Image: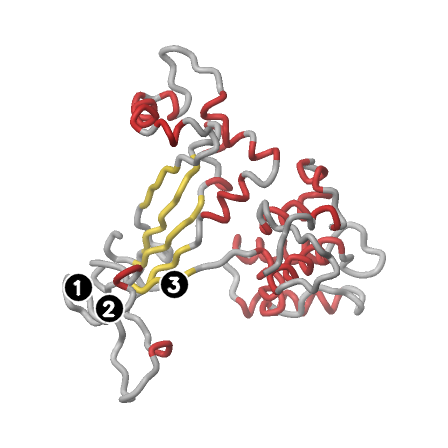
């Protein structure tokens, strides 16, 4: 066990500075938000566990110059920008590798820019962005989770869970499911909303804002919200409890080129936030991706 009660006092960045929206602190803040509000060790002489070590590696990369004397970019800022470009322009891993190789040829040889996508991904693991793969019925009847996690056939249509294999004896971990969905854990992201003053105060806006009679500026002004508060007083009396909205719709990611394929992203929105924040992209949390063609 590794207790995290006072790490931030020993880190190279003053935590009070992280609420400053200035560009010099943006990557430090990104690392601390990824770590979460309780990520703080109490004994710096103790060897850090793997999670802590990944966190310290991220802090180091946020402070590390791309090459000696480069003051405009850090290792982390370059990696984050490259990944953003890759996602924005739908680049392949091979294309990303070629870009990294070309950049490394142009700048001083003692640089710290990753040589390929694998090295980049290895560094970004410290951002703690896990994904869970959950098997599902090929006919969208059910998911194999919880008390149904050990089933090998759908309990509704009886379709097999796994694709047939030629080998007689195959370990369970090597079996390939007909279909699976991807779940991105929500709890750590909600915890990070309270990790810093800038976002923590906005998470109480739904209770603290001024209400104008007869005007609905936010869903907290609606009769349904107020009815929920009356029905669940123990929940509503704590303004930091999170109210979530869930939405989903199917779309074809490869509509222009390639074969027809559909998927259903499930988006979760924290409605604690004010109206000018809750519908912005950074606060629309992609929680689940369900492969099509049927809706979840």
Q: Which mark is residue 155?
A: 1
Q: Position of residue 139 (x, y in %)?
A: 20, 62
For discs 1 and 3, the disc positioned in front in the rendered view: 1
Vertical placement of 284 versus 261: above or below? Answer: above
Residue shown at 63%/61% (left/top)?
54
At a point 55% along the width and 58% down the height, the residue shown is: 86
- Residue 74 lies, in percent from the top left, at 73, 54
Whether residues under marks 1 and 2 lie with C-beta atoms below 8 angstroms apart, the answer is yes
Q: Label 2: state its secondary structure.
A: loop
Q: Is residue 10 left or right of residue 37?
A: right
Q: Nearer the viewer, mark 3 or mark 2?
A: 2
Query: Is 131 left or right of 102, judged from the image as shown?
Result: left
Q: Earlier in the sequence, mark 1 or mark 3?
A: 3
Location of mark 3 (residue): 133
How much space separates mark 1 and mark 2, taking CA atoms? 8 Å
Mark 1 is surrounded, within 10 Å at the Cα level, by few (under 14), some (14 to 19) or many (20 or more) other residues, namely some
Q: Which residue is mark 2?
A: 151
Work out whether 172 lies above or below 84. Answer: below
Q: Residue 193, position in %: x, y?
A: 53, 40
Decide: few, some or many residues near mark 2? Use Cα within 10 Å; few <14, some 14-19, many ≥20. few
In the rendered image, which quarter is residue 51 located in?
bottom right
Among the two numbered marks 3 and 2 on one chain, the one whose residue lies closer to the N terminus: 3
Quadrant into which the N terminus falls: bottom right
Residues 229 and 21: in front is: 229
Report helix, strand or loop for mark 3: strand
Can residue 78 be seen from the camera position used here?
no
- Residue 136 placement: quadrant: bottom left
- Position in image of residue 8 (x %, y %): 70, 47
């Amino acid at each position: 066990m590794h207790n995290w009660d006072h790490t931030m006092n020993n880190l190279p960045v003053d935590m009070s500075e992280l609420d400053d929206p200035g560009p010099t602190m943006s990557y430090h803040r990104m690392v601390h938000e990824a770590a979460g509000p309780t990520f703080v060790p109490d004994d710096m002489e103790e060897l850090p566990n793997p999670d802590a070590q990944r966190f310290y590696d991220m802090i180091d990369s946020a402070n590390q110059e791309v090459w000696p004397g480069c003051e405009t970019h850090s290792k982390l800022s370059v990696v984050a920008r490259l990944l953003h470009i890759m996602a924005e322009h739908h680049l392949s891993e091979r294309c990303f590798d070629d870009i990294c190789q070309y950049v490394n040829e142009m700048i001083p040889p003692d640089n710290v820019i990753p040589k390929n996508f694998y090295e980049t991904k290895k560094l970004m693991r410290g951002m703690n962005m896990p994904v869970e793969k959950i098997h599902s019925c090929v006919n969208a009847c059910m998911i194999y989770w919880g008390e149904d996690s050990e089933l090998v056939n759908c309990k509704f249509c009886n379709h097999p869970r796994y694709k047939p294999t030629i080998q007689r004896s195959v370990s369970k971990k090597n079996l390939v499911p007909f279909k699976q969905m991807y779940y991105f854990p929500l709890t750590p992201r909600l915890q990070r909303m309270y990790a810093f003053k800038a976002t923590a105060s906005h998470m109480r806006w739904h209770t603290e804002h001024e209400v104008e009679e007869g005007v609905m500026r936010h869903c907290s002004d609606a009769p349904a919200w107020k009815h929920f508060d009356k029905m669940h007083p123990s929940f509503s009396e704590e303004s930091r409890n999170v109210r979530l909205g869930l939405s989903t719709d199917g779309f074809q990611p490869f509509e222009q080129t390639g074969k027809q394929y559909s998927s259903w992203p499930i988006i979760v929105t924290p409605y604690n936030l004010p109206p000018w924040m809750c519908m912005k992209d950074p606060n629309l949390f992609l929680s689940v991706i369900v492969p099509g063609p049927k809706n979840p």
